[in-house]
Amino acid sequence: MLTITCTSLSGGQGKTTASVFLGRMLAQAEQRVLMVDADPQANLTFYLGHEVQENQPTLLEVLKKQVSTEDGIYEVGENLWLIPADDGLDKAQDFLSSSGMGAIVLSKRLKEVADVFHYCIIDAPPQRSQICLTTAGAADYVVIPAEASSKGVNSLIRTLGLIEELKEIDAFAGKILGILPFRDKWVGNNQAAQSKASIETMRTIAETIPVLPSIPESEQFKKAIDKGVTLSSLGFGQLEAPFQQIIEGLQKNV
């Protein structure tokens, strides 16, 4: 099982959007995909149409090993499964910080089901936290979504800094698969000046890290999420280019 964490140290950067479409496209290609919602806001859980019932295990119970990893997994579509979150996931912070091995806890839990799935997609929280650290520690690959704006550039700088810190303490042994510009604004055939400048700055910051095709600002993403389908099924397959490039990059490393 290859594990991909979508992470960025600011809200609204496209982490959940990237996670949803990457997971759905891999599932459509008949890959068995496990989605992990590691954000207490639980947007991934909501987007995948799963409602956490009372006393139903979530990622919190999986991390604390109150249930087996298998018992925290729910089927949410063809070839698609989810370890959900709710706002109770915030309680994992103290457990991870006091465990003495917080950065590797999620990795250890996922190993229990590594033979069952082809891919695991983790939607990380937007804060520098113990949960964020354990999602990075679990990753074979990281994708960093970043809004095509000054806020996105700042988020990218902070995220790259965190990953370097984790490398120095051997808490991250994965690889950054690419930077994914989000909400790239166009008017007709003309790219907005701010988007263009922000993406060029990202390329400078990235150095040798690939900057992937951008996710344009489009209502079609919301429509596809609301309908629980891929963009290609709505007739907008051209919008899948960023995710297709990620998948091709993953396949080279299988």
Image (spheres, rainbow, N blue to C red):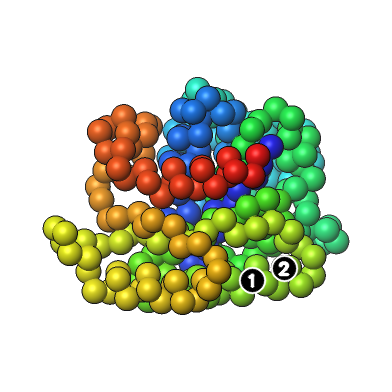
Query: Mark 1 highlights which residue?
Result: 162
Q: Nearer the viewer, residue 86 or 75?
A: 75
Q: Position of residue 239 (x, y in %)?
A: 31, 45
* Quadrant of the image containing the C terminus: top right
Q: Position of residue 200 (x, y in %)?
A: 38, 73
Q: Residue furthest front?
A: 252
* Quadrant of the image containing the N terminus: top right
Q: For the residue labelled by badge 1, is the local secondary structure a helix, a strand or a loop?
A: helix
Q: Nearer the viewer, residue 114 or 248?
A: 248
Q: Position of residue 149 (x, y in %)?
A: 35, 71
Kindly indicate the quadrant of the structure image that contains residue 150: bottom left
Identify the residue at image location x=21%, y=61%.
Answer: 186
Image position of 251 (left or right of 96): left
Q: Residue furthest left?
A: 188
Q: For the residue labelled by badge 2, is the local secondary structure a helix, a strand or a loop?
A: helix
Identify the residue at image location x=73%, y=48%.
Answer: 106
Q: CA distance from mark 2 to mark 1?
A: 6 Å
The reply to whether the C-beta atoms of the residues labelled 2 and 1 are less than 8 Å apart is yes
Query: Mark 2 highlights which residue?
Result: 166
Q: Position of residue 120 (x, y in %)?
A: 62, 40
Kindly indicate the quadrant of the structure image that contains residue 135: bottom right
Res 43 visible: no
Q: Nearer the viewer, residue 100 or 123?
A: 123
